[in-house]
């Protein structure tokens, strides 16, 4: 593989978008968090407001978010092209391979990977038709303007599964 081929990895093969949202965190982590970046927040790093709330909640329990792998559901800004979406999902599935626990963060992620409404399964284990991890949990995005009770319930279940399965 030449360096030109490697550069092409950071470009959508369908629309040519070069602003690829790359995963963050430890590649070999047994835990994957799949998230959908809210378009009004342009950063996909630990300073993103939603990831910042998740980071704070985990650190309250002495868990460092950086030990997990985090991937955005879309590998670039969402558009109407099905081939771009499918390419993004294929990349997420590659990231999910051999993971022991996956946390689906947000209603769109839950719907995409389970065909289920998050209101019915928030904080609970689910089965996915595309992801194969033994444990897949759901979590709503934290409400940045108010109560986060449902979010905290889901995170407490996530932490419990991490501890039960020696994933910390």
Image (cartoon, rainbow, N blue to C red):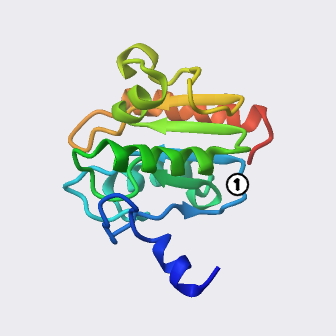
Q: Which of the 4 image quadrants contains residue 160?
A: top right
Residue at (55%, 37%) from the top-left corner? 103
Image x and y of residue 125, in percent: 59, 21
Front-lying residue, 29 or 73: 73
Above or below, comparing residue 21 to residue 89 in the picture: below
Above or below, comparing residue 133 to residue 89 in the picture: above
Answer left or right for 162 relative to 122.
right
Answer left or right for 88 relative to 103.
left
Most distant residue in the right direction: 166
Dot 1: what SS? Answer: loop
Above or below, comparing residue 150 to residue 27 in the picture: above
Image x and y of residue 82, in percent: 32, 41
* Residue 157 in view (yes/no): no
Image x and y of residue 75, in percent: 40, 56
Q: How many marks?
A: 1
Residue at (45%, 71%) from the top-left corner? 10
Quarter placement of the N terminus: bottom right
Front-lying residue, 51 or 108: 108
Answer left or right for 7 relative to 80.
right
* Residue at mark 1: 29
Answer left or right for 144 relative to 83.
left
Above or below, comparing residue 7 to residue 55 in the picture: below
Image x and y of residue 120, in percent: 40, 13
* Residue 39 in view (yes/no): yes
Most distant residue in the top direction: 120
Residue at (67%, 29%) from the top-left corner? 135
Front-lying residue, 99 or 145: 99
């Amino acid at each position: 593989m030449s360096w030109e081929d490697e550069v092409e990895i950071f470009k959508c093969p369908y629309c040519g978008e070069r602003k690829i949202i790359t995963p963050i965190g430890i590649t070999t982590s047994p835990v994957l968090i799949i998230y959908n970046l809210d378009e009004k927040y342009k950063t996909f790093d630990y300073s993103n407001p939603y990831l910042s709330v998740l980071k704070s909640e985990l650190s309250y329990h002495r868990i460092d978010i950086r030990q997990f792998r985090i991937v955005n559901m879309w590998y670039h800004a969402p558009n109407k092209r099905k081939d771009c979406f499918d390419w993004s999902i294929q990349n997420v599935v590659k990231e999910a391979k051999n993971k022991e626990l996956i946390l689906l963060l947000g209603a769109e992620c839950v719907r995409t990977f389970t065909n289920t409404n998050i209101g019915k399964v928030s904080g609970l284990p689910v089965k996915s038709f595309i992801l194969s991890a033994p444990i897949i949990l759901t979590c709503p995005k934290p409400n940045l303007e108010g109560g986060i009770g449902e979010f905290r319930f889901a995170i407490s279940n996530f932490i419990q599964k991490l501890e039960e399965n020696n994933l910390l």
